[in-house]
Image (cartoon, rainbow, N blue to C red):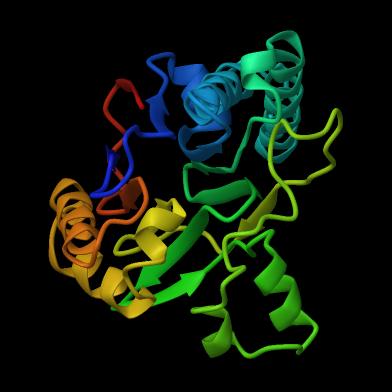
Amino acid sequence: MASDIGCVRSSNQDSIAFVSPSDADVRRRLGVLAVVADGMGGHNGGEVASALAVETICRHYFAAPDDDPGQALALALREANGVVFRASEADLALDGMGTTATALALIGTRVVFAHVGDSRLYRCVGGRCTQLTTDDSFVAEMVKNRMITAEQALHHPARNVLLRSLGTQAKLWLVAQSCDAATPGDCFVLCSDGLWDMVEMQEIARIVASVEAEEACRQLIELARERGGSDNISVGVLAIRSAEPPQELHSFAQ
């Protein structure tokens, strides 16, 4: 996981986290969790929103009492929505703040994810990249309704206008999703729009296929910066390399 301020912004409003619980039973039930959030709001509102969301998602996900990761992840994002919304109501300086959130849980070979906004989750296999999430954005809706093409959406002036985000309304309905089981050689990539707006899917697939996860994060951020780095850039790469149990790691960054 890595995050960079980019070349233009004066602050980093993204937040990231990767959590692998040390408790073997918790890890068996709920696996490991990665989250990317891209905040928005005046002054420091975006930073506050994304940090609150990431911390709340991680804490509530692993506090789930049952063995249903999908339900636990959906509830964690809904709880984060309420936390960010209440914080914005309590402080005029934070009024209207919100954040995207994309969260991925790997439980053995099971893949569960939940998503709000336009941060993305990709699955890269054999040098090819597939987007697992659908952007909650104005242009994505236009593409869906065949008002514009996917190519036109890439450069549409409203491509960053969101239809949904965490914390901008009191209640938010969402459900977790799943996909085919993870196998050795798969790479899952979470990123904010500061990356995907600058780096194409096939480039992401090529980089994560050629180097280890930490180096892939570095190269992806460098490439986005070389192309202007007009926004904060956050990326997480989870590479499935073997059946070995994950090492204990708790990491939060902003």
Question: Quick check: 174 left or right of 93?
Answer: right
**Front residue (pair 181, 227):** 227
Q: How many numbered marks are there? A: 0
Please indicate, yes or no, whether residue 187 appears anywhere in the rendered image. no
Q: Is residue 193 above or below residue 197?
A: above
Question: Quick check: 142 left or right of 204?
Answer: right
**Front residue (pair 153, 37):** 153
Residue at coordinates 32% horizontally, 53% vertically from top-left? 240
Q: What x and y, as percent, mark residue 77?
A: 68, 32
Residue at coordinates 30% horizontally, 69% vertically from top-left? 204
Question: Quick check: 53 left or right of 253?
Answer: right
Image quadrant holding the N terminus, namely top left
Image quadrant holding the C terminus, namely top left
Res. 41 image quadrant: top right
Please indicate, yes or no, whether residue 203 appears anywhere in the rendered image. yes
Residue at coordinates 37% horizontally, 15% vertically from top-left? 22
Q: Is residue 174 above or below residue 23?
A: below
Residue at coordinates 75% horizontally, 72% vertically from top-left? 141
Q: Is residue 25 above or below residue 217?
A: above
Q: What x and y, as percent, mark residue 143?
A: 70, 82
Q: What x and y, as percent, mark residue 164?
A: 74, 49
**Outermost residue to the top:** 90
**Front residue (pair 68, 52):** 52
Q: What x and y, as percent, mark residue 83?
A: 70, 18
